[in-house]
Structures are given as structure tokens and as C-alpha cells.
Image (tube, rainbow, N blue to C red):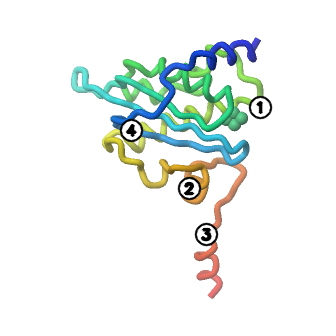
């Protein structure tokens, strides 16, 4: 059962918590459910390639997101950035079986946080990246970066300027 697998995963979540010495950080929020996932990556070098040495996460959200993030951070250890970038939400949540339709976005948030970390933070040690890493979902929404789909961010000042 899906619920039992989620319960088992969150009973002992792996790699939960902020990583003070992270090399990359990615944050994604969902405007629909109000949840947010932040992923931290620490890199090392192997044969001239950047390898994910450690990964951790913070989740201000539902149990499914915590379960997927926990599994994903385990899965990411030892992967090159190219390999990590190939990982889909389905692969990261495979330990839970197929996600119910209402929970698919939970896995997608983890995938989004991973992509944000890899694309935005690979060469930026522990610096929150403008536009992708904010202290709160509201900050992400205001920046217009963490939301996909149903919300259109309109800059009111620009709109007023356009009118005049
Ligand atoms: Fe939104 Fe799970 S319900 S992340």
C-alpha cells in the first residue's frame, strides 16, 4: 500500500536537515498546496568530474514529499551531475510505487529542487541563488520562479508603466 510505504519512509527519514557546507541549493514551491522542498548538494571530484558526495533536504510540506526527498537524497550519493540530471520524479519515488494522481506533484517538487540546485548552484558554494532560493514560499512566488502551471505572476509596476 502506498500509505504504508510513505509511513515507513517518514518514520526514519534519511538526510533530513539543512547542510551548512552545501555547494548547491535548490528550492521549489507549489502554489497549489503551499508546500516547499529545498535540496542541498555537496560535491567532490572524481576523475575530473563533479560527483554528489552528499545530499540533504528540508521539506515544508506533506509526507509524500518528505518520503520522496529522503529516497532521492540516498539515490543521489555518488552520482555525477549528468547522472543526477537524468533522474526523473518517477525514478526518485519508485520506492513508494506509483504515486496517486494527487501526489504526483510531490515527487515533481523534489525533481524541481534537484534541477534548481544542479543548474543554479553547481559553482556557487552555499550562496542562495537569486530567483531560485528564498527563505519562504512567498519569496519564491514573488520572484516568479518556483511556480509552474496555474499562476501567472504579473508585475503591477510594469503594468502601470505600460499603461502610461
Ligand atoms: Fe504538495 Fe505533497 S501535497 S508537495
Cβ of mark 4 under 8 A from ligand 1: no
1 or 2: mark nearer the eye: 2
Report the image quarter containing ligand 1. Answer: top right
Query: Which quarter of the rendered picture does the N terminus lie within?
Result: top right
Q: Which residue is mark 1?
A: 102
| Residue 96 quadrant | top right
4 or 2: mark nearer the eye: 2
Helix, strand or loop under label 2: helix
**Which residue is at the far left?**
48
The disc, 4 or 2, on the residue closer to the chain's N-terminal end is: 4
Helix, strand or loop under label 3: loop
Left/right of residue 40 with respect to residue 30 in the rendered view = left
Q: Percent position (x, y) of residue 138?
A: 61, 54
The numbered mark at residue 24 is: 4
How far apart marks 4 and 2 lie (CA) works out to: 19 Å
How far apart marks 3 and 2 lie (CA) works out to: 14 Å
Cβ of mark 1 under 8 A from ligand 1: yes
Circle 3 packing at 10 Å, graded few (<14), some (14-19), many (20+), is: few
Helix, strand or loop under label 1: helix
Query: In the picture shown, does residue 57 fall above or below 8?
Result: below
Q: Are marks 1 and 2 in contact (CB under 8 Å)?
A: no
Q: Which residue is mark 3?
A: 155
Amino acid at each position: 500500500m502506498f500509505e504504508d510505504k510513505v509511513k515507513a519512509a517518514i518514520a526514519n527519514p534519511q538526510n533530513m536537515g539543512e547542510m551548512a557546507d552545501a555547494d548547491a541549493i535548490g528550492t521549489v514551491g507549489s502554489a497549489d498546496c503551499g508546500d516547499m522542498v529545498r535540496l542541498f548538494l555537496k560535491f567532490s571530484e572524481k576523475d575530473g568530474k563533479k560527483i554528489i558526495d552528499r545530499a540533504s533536504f528540508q521539506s515544508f510540506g506533506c509526507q509524500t514529499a518528505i518520503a520522496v526527498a529522503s529516497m532521492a537524497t540516498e539515490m543521489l550519493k555518488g552520482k555525477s551531475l549528468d547522472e543526477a540530471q537524468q533522474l526523473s520524479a518517477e525514478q526518485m519515488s519508485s520506492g513508494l510505487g506509483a504515486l496517486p494522481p494527487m501526489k504526483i506533484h510531490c515527487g515533481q517538487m523534489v525533481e524541481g529542487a534537484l534541477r534548481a540546485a544542479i543548474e543554479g548552484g553547481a559553482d556557487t558554494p552555499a550562496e542562495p541563488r537569486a530567483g531560485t532560493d528564498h527563505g519562504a514560499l512567498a519569496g519564491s512566488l514573488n520572484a516568479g520562479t518556483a511556480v509552474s502551471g496555474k499562476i501567472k505572476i504579473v508585475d503591477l509596476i510594469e503594468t502601470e508603466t505600460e499603461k502610461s
